[in-house]
Image (spheres, grey):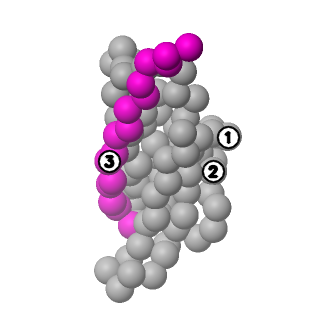
Amino acid sequence: MRCSAVFTNSSGTAIDPTAVLFKVTNPAGTPTTYTYGEDDELVKDSVGNYHVDVDANAAGVWRYRFYSTGTGQAAEEGMFIVEESAF
């Protein structure tokens, strides 16, 4: 599952924050955090545009959060549901 975020300034122009992080919690409640520049899973596509491809390998509710620190502080949260396979 691809999770994406765009970081912008107050005038809507895409910016790169000082630090970009991504946290995902699987249906069992286990969190994993990735930091841009340290973890290959958190990818910068272009200025201000980032994504993580989550290996959604369990049925249930997955929750995620992109957030940044320093210049360009922001946060965005989301969730997705993986249904049990009929096969």
Q: Position of residue 44 (x, y in %)?
A: 62, 57
Compare marks 3 and 2 and give the one earlier in the sequence: 2
Secondary structure under the numbered disc 3 in the rendered image: strand
Q: Position of residue 51 (x, y in %)?
A: 56, 51
Mark 3 and mark 1: Cα distance apart in space:
21 Å
Which residue corresponds to the image point at 39% horizontal and 60% vertical from the top-left? 70
3 vs 28: above or below: below
Which residue corresponds to the image point at 38% horizontal and 51% vertical from the top-left? 67
63 vs 67: above or below: above
- The answer to if 2 sits in the magenta stretch is no
- The answer to if 81 sits in the magenta stretch is yes
Q: Which residues are magenta?
A: 72-87
Secondary structure under the numbered disc 1 in the rendered image: loop
Looking at the rendered structure, the kind of residue marked 1 is Asp
Looking at the rendered structure, the kind of residue marked 2 is Val
Which residue corresponds to the image point at 54% horizontal and 39% vertical from the top-left? 1
Say which mark, if any, is on residue 40. Answer: 1
Characterize the local packing of mark 1: few (<14), some (14-19) or many (20 or more) Cα atoms within 10 angstroms. Answer: few
Looking at the rendered structure, the kind of residue marked 3 is Glu
For mark 3, what is the residue? 77
Q: Are marks 3 and 1 in contact (CB under 8 Å)?
A: no
Q: Position of residue 71 (x, y in %)?
A: 40, 66
Q: Position of residue 50 (x, y in %)?
A: 55, 57
Report whether residue 79 is seen.
yes
For mark 2, what is the residue? 43
Characterize the local packing of mark 2: few (<14), some (14-19) or many (20 or more) Cα atoms within 10 angstroms. Answer: some
Residue that protrudes farthest toward the bottom in the picture = 11
Secondary structure under the numbered disc 2 in the rendered image: strand
Q: Are marks 1 and 2 in contact (CB under 8 Å)?
A: yes
Of 62 and 21, the residue lying toward us: 62
